[in-house]
Amino acid sequence: MGLLREGINEMIATTQGNAAPMGFIFRNESASMVLFKGSHTEENIRRDGWVVANVTHDPVVWVRTAFEDLSADAFIDIEAEGRTMQRLAACEAWAAFHATVRHETAETYFVTLEPLGGEVLDPSVHPHNRGFAGIVEATVHATRFMMGRDPALRALIDHHLAIVQKCGGPREREAAALLEGYII
Ligand SMILES: Cc1cc2nc3c(=O)[nH]c(=O)nc-3n(C[C@H](O)[C@H](O)[C@H](O)COP(=O)(O)O)c2cc1C
């Protein structure tokens, strides 16, 4: 299905005026998301019925979008299915989806996705970098750590940030410093 491959694709989800890291699930030929209640992303998807999956390898964008809002000029309008949606201005690729809430638990919404179109803007390849991967991992744990300050999660964050220092470049180290600032 276009950009998505089998499993969980970690991407930056854009909704109206908002961006956040989210998992786009692709299994058995169908795409879906599990949205924890309380985020801007789930609120916007339930209201508007669309989401755009963005590919970016900028580690600072991963940390920033997990913890705060981007300015309006970080988004570009795109047309899909006769509607205006928004992608990241600086993404490498994007895919737009019609999103439908199928069921709800006390903590989550399960949403199915139908592809509406997409584009690869920057075809450059990225050798795997453990520093970049470490930022994504540390950021997942950090979003959960903020909910209860569990010391086990803090240990996982520190583990991944140590790998970032060893294997990352300047942009990964900048993202690590930003992340440390959010979780103190
Ligand atoms: C790599 C990664 C994957 C994530 N996947 C999900 C997800 O699938 N569903 C979800 O609800 N939150 C997920 N999160 C957490 C959200 O990004 C986080 O709650 C964020 O603050 C939501 O921002 P928003 O309020 O602007 O939507 C993920 C975080 C990271 C770093």
Image (cartoon, grey):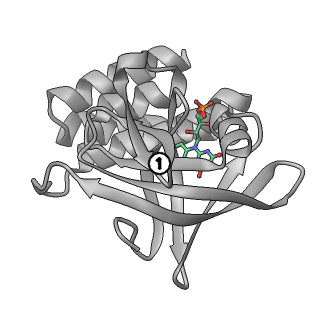
Quadrant where the N terminus is found in the figure: bottom left
Q: Where is residue 132 in the image (x, y as percent from the top left)?
A: 27, 43
> Considering only vertical position in the picture, is 102 above or below 36?
below
> Considering only vertical position in the picture, is 162 above or below 35?
above
78 vs 10, nearest the viewer: 78
Residue 176's quadrant in the figure?
top left
In the image, farthest residue toward the left:
124
Q: Which residue is drawn at 23% across and 46% down?
A: 92
84 vs 24, nearest the viewer: 84
Element at label 1: strand
Compared across the picture, whether 62 is left or right of 66 comes to: left
Disc 1 packing (10 Å; few <14; some 14–19; many ≥20) = many
Residue 70's quadrant in the figure?
top left
Give the residue pinned by disc 1: 52
Q: Where is residue 48 in the image (x, y as percent from the top left)?
A: 66, 42
Q: Which residue is drawn at 54% across and 20% down?
A: 183
Compared across the picture, whether 179 is left or right of 124 comes to: right
Q: Residue at x 62, y 38 (%)?
A: 41
165 vs 66, nearest the viewer: 66
Compared across the picture, whether 158 is left or right of 148 comes to: left
Q: What residue type is labelled 1?
A: Val
Mark 1 Cβ and ligand 1 under 8 Å apart? no
Label count reads 1
Quadrant where the C terminus is found in the figure: top right
In the image, farthest residue toward the bottom:
28
Q: Position of residue 111 (x, y in %)?
A: 69, 60
Compared across the picture, whether 20 is left or right of 43 comes to: left
Q: Residue at x 26, y 22 (%)?
A: 174
Which quadrant of the frame does ligand 1 lie within? top right
In the image, farthest residue toward the front:
82
